[in-house]
Image (tube, rainbow, N blue to C red):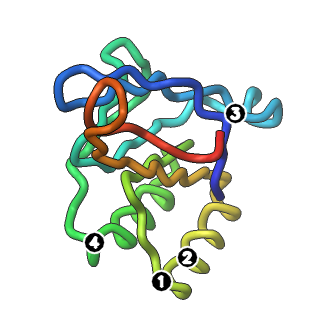
Amino acid sequence: MINTNIHHAKSTLNVVQLSFPFDGAPSRLSRPRGWCYLLSNSVAFKKDMPHTIRMQKPDEETVPAWISKLITSGQCKTIYVENLALNASERANIQKLCHLYAVSVINLQVKNDSNIQGGKNVVVGPW
């Protein structure tokens, strides 16, 4: 469910411009291109990225329902979520849907750390 092949991020003011989406596995090349969604409060896709939609992240209780609806729409390839927090049952349900619909959900851990060069909204993770 979590892919760690994320390229890089550039910080501009209070928005991190993510150079997503990356191409999926070769098995996805034969399928029509799907949409990549970003549920976030502080990060955004680069402006020239095709097939991407950024949505303001809803409250934590609503996030699992939104993810489920995006997955089951049939038009989704990847969902990036800023600081995703799921309980065990929500995680199991979303993993099952991801498998059924061939969708990836990627948790972007965004930390606001004034000690990091460039300031705030740094996307971190084990890339």
Secondary structure type for disc 4: loop
Q: Residue at x 67, y 35 (%)?
A: 5
Q: Residue at x 60, y 51 (%)?
A: 104
Q: Which residue is mark 1?
A: 87
The residue to which callout 3 is attached is 24
Asked if labels 4 and 1 touch by Cβ distance under 8 angstroms, the answer is: no
* Residue 122 % position (x, y): 37, 37
Q: Residues within 10 Å of mark 1 (few under 14, many from 20)?
A: few
Q: Earlier in the sequence, mark 3 or mark 1?
A: 3
Mark 3 vs mark 2, CA separation in Å: 22 Å
Q: Residue at x 41, y 18 (%)?
A: 49
Alpha carbon distance from label 1 to label 2:
6 Å
**Mark 3 to mark 1 CA distance (whole Å):** 27 Å
Please tell me which residue is depicted at 30% across the width and 44% down the height of the picture. Answer: 113
Compared to 61, does 70 lie above or below? above
Between discs 1 and 4, the one toward the N terminus? 4
Of callouts 2 and 4, which one flags the residue occurring earlier in the amino acid sequence?
Answer: 4
Q: Residues within 10 Å of mark 2 (few under 14, many from 20)?
A: some
